[in-house]
Structures are given as structure tokens and as C-alpha cells.
Amino acid sequence: MLEALRQAVWEANIRLPRERLVTMTSGNASGRDPETGLVVIKPSGVLYDVLKPEDLVVVDLDGNIVEGKLKPSVDTATHLYIYRHRPDVNGIIHTHSPYATSFAALGEPIPVVLTAIADEFGGPIPCGPYAPVGGEEIGKAVVDHIGSSPAILLKSHGVFAIGPDVHAALKAAVMVEDVAKTVHLAMLRGRPQPLPEEEVQRAHKAYKEKYGQR
């Protein structure tokens, strides 16, 4: 079932430890099929280096298992809440990547002090409130506080990145950690100043309209 989506979600999941965004079994990636609304997600507690495409679990938007022998991620309710409330989102990545999560531990957004942040995120990377794991509360916090950003930090937890597909969400998750590391290093040396709002909007618009192949 959903062979192409299953392959894409598997590839995104195994990229997470390669990009140093997760350790052991933490974090997860999921993707939604726009036609059926079905979601493919990582199974709970399975090591990435033994994860196979057939291990992924297919669930409907109510959380019912449609296909799969393993238990889905404990974050499944979070992913499904986001999908139900954001029809533009078809890919979600969750990580505890260390530099970004250090901002989350302090309940702080990542300020827009780099052109890379302006380009990719269009403003500061927001930090939402703490929410308990296992239910819909995290999904609600993401939806309520992410705004137009493709990524958000959640206080004392980690990173959620979203996109029109799972690969776009993965890119956002990788970029969050990359810019968080640079901002962290800059803060050790001084106090980096945010870019002017008009420059942030100009850079973000140009990036969306001109970057990459069309």
C-alpha cells in the first residue's frame, strides 16, 4: 500500500540520524497521501539502522491502523492533529536535534539574525509552549503557534518541521539545526542583531520565487 509514499517516508526517517538530528530511536518522520488521506509513519521504538520500508505503519486520520504489523510512533496523535488542521501539510518531521533543542529548553525562538533564516523561514523560528507527549496537545501547540514558518520549537521538547511533502519537511528540519548551531556559536561571542523586517521579507520572497530550478 502507498509504495511510493512508503519509500519516501522511509528515506526521510533514515536520513534523520545521518543528519545528526536524532539518536537511537528518538524522532520520526511521516507523510500523508493527499488522495486517500492515509498517513505513513515510523513504528515506535525501532532503530533506524534496522528500519525497513515494510516496517512503516499506515494509519487513517483517526489513528486506526490500516496496514502494518508494528505499533505506530507514540507521536502519531500529534502528526494526525497537524494533518487534520493543516490541509497544506503532507510531511512532518520530529527531532530532538541538540542545538535547536537547546533553544527549546530555554523556551526561546531562534532569532532571524542570518540570511539563511530569512530565506528559509521568513522570520524567527518560533517556540511554542510545553505540551505533554502522547496525545493531541503537541499537535495543537504546533498548529496554534507555527504561523507561516515551516518549523517550530516546542518548549522543553524539540523540533517539529512541516512541508508540502516529507522531503520538504526534512529540509526544514535540517536547516533548523544548521542555523541553530550558527546562532548558538554567535551568541557565545556576542549579541547578534536581527535583520530588519523589510529585509527579511524581501529575502524570503526572493528565495521562494527564484531559488532552485523551475
Image: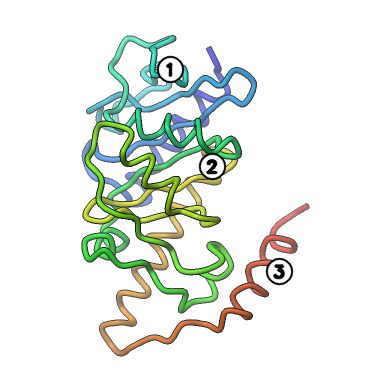
* Mark 3 or 2: the one toward you: 3
Q: Residue at x 71, y 69 (%)?
A: 206
Neighbourhood count class around disc 3 (C-alpha, 10 Å): few under 14, some 14–19, many 20 upward: few
Provide residue 63's location: percent of width, then percent of height.
39, 18
Q: Which residue is mark 3?
A: 206
Cα separation, mark 3 vs mark 2, equals 21 Å
Q: Residue at x 34, y 55 (%)?
A: 128
Picture quadrant where residue 72 is located:
top left
What SS does tag 1 mark? strand
* Residue furthest bottom as drawn: 190
User: Is residue 105 placed above or below 19 in the rendered structure?
Assistant: below
Picture quadrant where residue 2 is located:
top right
Question: Are the residues flagged by discs 3 and 1 in contact, CB closer than 8 Å?
Answer: no
Who comes first in sequence, dot 3 or dot 2? Answer: 2
Provide residue 49's location: percent of width, then percent of height.
29, 32
* Mark 2 or 1: the one toward you: 1
Q: Looking at the picture, which amino acid does disc 1 mark?
A: Val
Foreground pick, 14 / 197: 197
Q: Looking at the picture, which amino acid does disc 2 mark?
A: His
* Residue furthest right as drawn: 214
Q: Which residue is mark 2?
A: 167
Q: Residue at x 43, y 63 (%)?
A: 125
Neighbourhood count class around disc 1 (C-alpha, 10 Å): few under 14, some 14–19, many 20 upward: many
Q: Residue at x 63, y 72 (%)?
A: 201
Cα separation, mark 3 vs mark 1, equals 38 Å
Q: Which residue is mark 1?
A: 59
Provide residue 84's location: percent of width, then percent of height.
50, 30
Picture quadrant where residue 192 is located:
bottom left
Who comes first in sequence, dot 2 or dot 1? Answer: 1
Who comes first in sequence, dot 3 or dot 1? Answer: 1
